[in-house]
């Protein structure tokens, strides 16, 4: 069986090898392959030479940068699934054009996140049999693993159904509903992994699942705004129409109005929630919460708040700015950098005050090692390569509306 | 079935760290991987300031949060009350280290605090992280109990010297190191304690010394508000103190 000859119901190739990759996709695949190759090679070599001593984590700071990267990718993935579900579950026509792209992005962010986790664990392959056989229902991490595994399977099936033009089938609809429920439960459970830890007061919070779901959704909006603004660097309606092969006012409405506004409003909600966390942390006398004061000294905190939250909110605050693809691009990149810092900052805050190490122990200091930093190009490399490949081979701009208008003259 | 527990009399403890050293030798720990440690605290200020200390093994909690969070059930509670790690199931996710309120767990596959890295001086073979020149006899090493030199990529912690206490005669109320018949079944830190500040026995046995001490000298547990209910009790008496804080409490200036 030659995979290149397989087709969908309407005769479109399953993998579109016939077309040449557009320059953006080609660049992404190349950049992804280089970054991912260098990153993975560096990590593998150092892990082989030094084991996990190549990381700067310690028994006092047990979870470090790799877990932060993992959070970044997994929560973004869940947010992307929510955006895809706005169409496939709730029937919001406005989001049709980006649904398929979001499902693909959700799959590849999960793959990048899982890859990073596998490199962080002491025995990743043992996990494959030890977790299913343990059935430890008291462990939020067990549920998190189970739900994200289910999430990945459902997303793959959902993508296959959309790709084979089964947008309107009952199966797709029902599967999308299940996938939506799982993509809420999975980041929620990931929130519980941190939020249920009463012995780590800086994390302990019943709203941690909500914070994870909300910030995951916000990262997803930033991802979508980023990638859709890349499609239209020419800042013209023609580019959008050409990409989607549809002359549809709705598309422009989505890109110029809906997505930037969604970005702005969700960011305001994230800021409100984060301000609540910071004030609680600074006000509280409870032992362990002094880490919030320590956080004020960290550049990560300021990157998160000023560059990641306040500046993008200002950039998206007026109609004129919101409709400008360059501003969209800038705001989304700034937010992604900010939330990336926020994930690492969150990890550090919860562990910075040592547990029973005596008066001679100080705050636990932590800076990622070279190997830990190399997980960033590794993760983003995998992500970019798969995104570029998807953009080339999988018709990510396809949407449910069946009519295909001829390409507009340009 | 016994439910083993420990009582540490802080009025008798001199903070000499012999327990830490004995544990290191018995269990072949790496430098800094102190399953049993003695923590030091400064209390008060001149002229009434003083130095206090707290010996800290694993608390072997009745309701251990580390067991609840372990996604593979590698960490488990035995019927006789010890909290152990099955190194054949541990995936090294370190969630137990996050969830332990007492900071008693170690992931030894990290940058070593002392150089040269002793693991490179004595490289491990046949699944061992390293090969200490002095080590526990091979037949006592038990991966399912987390006893002996650990493999790579797993979490480790005090196991109440389970290779010793699990061999104790059934129905023994106390493992008294002064009794030659019981000495070999008593945890190393208890055996070595020069001022006999440590007692080890069956918390469920009404005849046990540990139970008597807890009742008569008002034994307290560390951080009881966590709900973990440690099986290690401290006797503060009139002269000693239990540290109020888990760590550094900075002055708000």
Image (cartoon, helix red, strand yellow):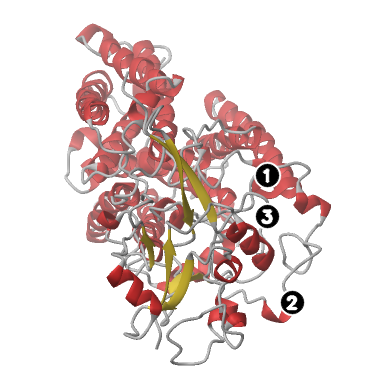
Mark pair 3, 2: CA separation: 17 Å
- In this rendering, the count of numbered labels is 3
Parent chain of label 2: B
Residue tagged 1 = B112
Taking the image as shown, residue B22 lies to the left or right of residue B230, namely right
Q: Which secondary structure, mark 3?
A: loop
The answer to the question of whether label 1 and label 3 lie on touching residues, with beta carbons closer than 8 A, is yes
Q: Residues within 10 Å of mark 3 (few under 14, many from 20)?
A: many
Mark pair 2, 1: CA separation: 25 Å
Is residue B27 visible to the viewer in this orientation of the structure? yes
Q: Is residue B63 above or below residue A89?
A: below
> Residue B137 got which mark?
2
Give the camera-side residue of B85 and B153: B85
Quadrant for residue A225, please give it: top left
Mark pair 1, 3: CA separation: 9 Å
Quarter the N terminus of chain A occupies = bottom right
The answer to the question of whether label 3 and label 2 lie on touching residues, with beta carbons closer than 8 A, is no
Give the camera-side residue of B164 and B95: B164
Quarter the C terminus of chain A occupies = top left
x, y percentage for residue A114?
A: 50, 50
Residue tagged 3 = B30
Taking the image as shown, residue A234 lies to the left or right of residue B29, namely left
Parent chain of label 1: B
Foreground mark, 2 or 1? 2
């Amino acid at each position: 069986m030659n995979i290149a000859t397989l087709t969908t119901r309407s005769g479109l190739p399953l993998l579109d090898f016939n077309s040449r990759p557009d320059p953006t996709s080609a660049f992404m695949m190349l950049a992804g392959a280089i970054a991912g190759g260098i990153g993975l090679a560096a990590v593998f070599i150092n892990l082989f030479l030094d084991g996990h001593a190549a990381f700067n984590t310690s028994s006092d700071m047990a979870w470090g940068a790799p877990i932060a990267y993992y959070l970044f990718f997994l929560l973004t993935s869940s947010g992307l699934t929510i955006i895809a579900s706005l169409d496939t579950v709730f029937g919001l026509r406005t989001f049709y054009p980006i649904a398929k792209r979001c499902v693909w992005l959700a799959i590849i962010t999960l793959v990048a996140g899982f890859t990073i986790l596998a490199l962080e664990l002491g025995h990743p392959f043992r996990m494959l049999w030890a977790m299913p056989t343990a059935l430890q229902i008291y462990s939020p991490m067990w549920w998190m693993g189970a739900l994200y595994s289910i999430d990945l399977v459902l997303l793959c099936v959902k993508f296959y159904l959309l790709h084979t033009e089964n947008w309107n089938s009952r199966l797709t609809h029902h599967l999308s509903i299940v996938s939506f429920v799982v993509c809420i439960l999975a980041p929620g459970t990931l929130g519980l992994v941190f939020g249920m830890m009463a012995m780590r007061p800086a994390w302990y919070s019943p709203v941690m699942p909500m914070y994870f779901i909300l910030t995951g959704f916000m990262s997803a909006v930033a991802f979508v705004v980023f990638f859709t603004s890349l499609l239209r660097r020419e800042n013209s309606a023609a580019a959008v129409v050409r990409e989607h092969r549809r002359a549809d006012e709705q598309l422009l409405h989505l890109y110029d109005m809906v997505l930037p506004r969604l970005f702005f409003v969700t960011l305001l909600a994230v800021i409100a929630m984060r301000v609540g966390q910071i004030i609680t942390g600074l006000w509280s006398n409870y032992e362990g919460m002094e880490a919030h004061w320590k956080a004020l000294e960290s550049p990560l905190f300021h990157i998160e708040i000023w560059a990641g939250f306040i500046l993008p909110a200002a950039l998206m605050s007026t109609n004129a700015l919101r409709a400008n693809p360059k501003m969209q691009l800038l705001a989304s990149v700034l937010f992604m950098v900010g939330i990336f810092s926020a994930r690492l900052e969150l990890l550090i805050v919860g562990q910075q005050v040592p547990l029973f190490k005596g008066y001679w122990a100080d705050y636990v200091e932590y800076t990622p090692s070279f190997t830990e930093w190399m997980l960033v190009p590794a993760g983003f490399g995998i992500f970019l390569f798969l995104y570029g490949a998807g953009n080339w081979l999988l018709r990510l701009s396809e949407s449910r509306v069946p009519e295909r208008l001829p390409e507009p003259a340009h | 079935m016994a439910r083993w527990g420990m009582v540490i009399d802080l009025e008798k403890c001199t903070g000499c760290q012999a327990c830490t050293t004995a544990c290191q030798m018995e269990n072949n720990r790496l430098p800094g991987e102190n399953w049993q440690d003695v923590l030091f605290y400064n209390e008060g200020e001149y002229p009434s300031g003083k130095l206090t200390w707290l010996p800290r093994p694993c608390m072997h909690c009745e309701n251990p949060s580390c067991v609840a969070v372990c996604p593979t059930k590698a960490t488990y509670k035995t019927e006789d009350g010890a909290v152990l790690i099955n190194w054949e199931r541990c995936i090294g996710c370190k969630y137990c280290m996050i969830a332990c309120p007492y900071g008693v767990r170690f992931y030894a596959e990290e940058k070593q605090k002392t150089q040269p890295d002793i693991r490179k001086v004595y490289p491990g073979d046949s699944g061992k992280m390293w090969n200490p020149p002095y080590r526990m006899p091979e037949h006592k090493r038990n991966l399912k109990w987390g006893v002996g030199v650990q493999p790579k990529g797993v979490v480790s912690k005090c196991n109440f010297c389970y290779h010793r206490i699990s061999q104790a005669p059934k129905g023994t109320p106390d493992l008294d190191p002064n009794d030659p018949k019981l000495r070999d079944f008593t945890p190393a830190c208890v055996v070595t304690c020069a001022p006999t500040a440590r007692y080890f026995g069956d918390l469920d046995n009404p005849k046990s010394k540990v139970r008597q001490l807890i009742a008569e000298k008002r034994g307290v547990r560390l951080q009881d508000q966590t709900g973990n209910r440690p099986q290690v009790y401290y006797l503060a008496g009139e002269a000693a103190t239990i540290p109020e804080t888990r760590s550094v409490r900075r002055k708000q200036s």
